Image (tube, rainbow, N blue to C red):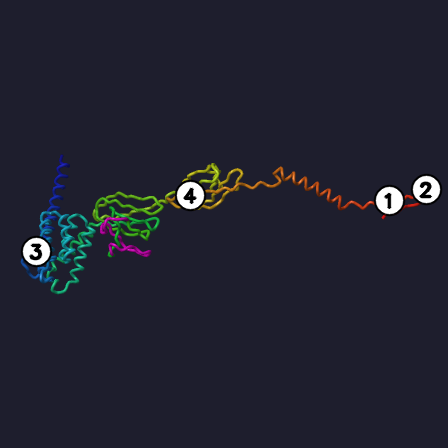
Amino acid sequence: MNVQRSRQRATGRRWTKRVREVAALATTLATFGAALVGAPRDAHAEDPVASTVSPENATTAHARELFAHATGLSKRMQWADALSTFEEVARLHPHPIVTMNIAICERALGRYTRARAMFNAFLEETAKLDAKSARTVSEGFMQDARNYVAEIDALLVHLDVTVKPAGVRIAVDGRPLTLEGGDVAAGESASTTGRRVAGLAPPGAGTSVSVTSFELILDPGAHLILASRSGHSDVLVNRSFTPGMHATLGLELEKLQGHLVVDSSVPRARVVLDGRDVGLTPIDLTRPAGRYSLAVDAKGHNPYTTTVVVEPGQTATTNAILVPTSRALTTRWWFWAGAASVVAGGVLLTYAVTRPTPADVPYDGGGTGWVAVVK
């Protein structure tokens, strides 16, 4: 019972502290709002709209009305609505005070990386104001912004991330990473180095990280970190981080296996892959990505051989055209019948050509010895 009461008292103290912090934010924001909605002016609260636009046009008047509405929303601690309204004001009439109020809303919503970026933007914008416009921003406001940045830096989580292989796309909570100090919309070059920040970019596909190790800055709390690369299995990390935490995170993606589909012009031909009989066509094989020696053969046909490359996560298809084997002439009956005839004819011709000429028979004249020669 005592432990439960102690926990309840601790929870109550934390809640009271949070309410006070939020109330202080609302008070600060309302102070900034006075500069745009026509509150009494002093050396630090010059109306930035009136001081930079004269005479007031319709767009400026609308921006002034929206700013007053956003200030009222912040007093009621409706931070999300106040934020969207201040962002609309910034589109109509950009000013450091508007940027400061956006930063305060982001901080109240617990989006610390975005709040820090906006506080820093407020300081940069203020430094660029001319002397007249600078009167609308007091040094006290600037010091508040510096204090908020220091406070947020102590809360942010820092991760030493290692990635294998390079070229992995990384998203945190459905948003790509941003190179610290760089353009949110800018891509990375092959030599890009530096710290990455989560939560600044609009929702979208992960950022292709060209290095294998980097520091990642993100808000405390629970996050979904997705690493993906073509031809590799995705890695999804669901992890919570405490304020100010420093930790390591390894993201190693494994290559996906590929498919090899083999068919042939002759059904059920034998398939040999890297010297091993793997089955008969048609066949669908799952193999690690790589280069393979493929042979397809069937009885009475010349074998088909080739080299195939199986890409990770892809399907390679081969259709083997098997050509019938030509029979030797000596295996056919008509060849030998013709050959016998040729041989017999050759023998007769040879005899006729090579036989000797017969000698003449001596004439016999009988008893009279007479021989008649007929010409």
Dominant secondary structure of the residues highlighted in magenta in the image: loop
Marks 2 and 3, the one that precedes in the sequence: 3
- Identity of the residue drawn at 49% across and 44% down: 305
Q: Residue furthest front?
A: 375
Q: Which residue is mark 1?
A: 361
Q: Which residue is mark 4?
A: 317
Give above or below for 336 relative to 89: above
Circle 1 crowding by C-alpha within 10 Å: few under 14, some 14–19, many from 20: few
Q: Is label 2 in a helix, a strand or a loop?
A: loop
Marks 4 and 3, the one that precedes in the sequence: 3
Q: Is label 1 in a helix, a strand or a loop?
A: loop
Q: Residue furthest top?
A: 1
Q: Nearer the viewer, mark 1 or mark 3?
A: 1
- How far apart in space, not on screen, are marks 1 and 3 (Cα)? 155 Å
Residue 57 in percent (x, y) is at: 10, 59
Marks 4 and 1, the one that precedes in the sequence: 4
**Callout 4 touching callout 2 (CB < 8 Å):** no
Query: Which one is in front, 374 or 278?
Result: 374
- Name which residue type carries label 2: Gly
Task: Report if residue 303 lies within the magenta region.
Answer: no
Q: Residue furthest left?
A: 40
Residue 269 in percent (x, y) is at: 48, 38
Circle 4 crowding by C-alpha within 10 Å: few under 14, some 14–19, many from 20: some
Q: Which residue is mark 3?
A: 37
Q: Is residue 317 visible?
A: yes
Marks 2 and 1, the one that precedes in the sequence: 1
Q: Which disc is residue 367 wearing?
A: 2
- How far apart in space, not on screen, are marks 2 and 3 (Cα)? 173 Å
- Name which residue type carries label 1: Val
- Name which residue type carries label 3: Val
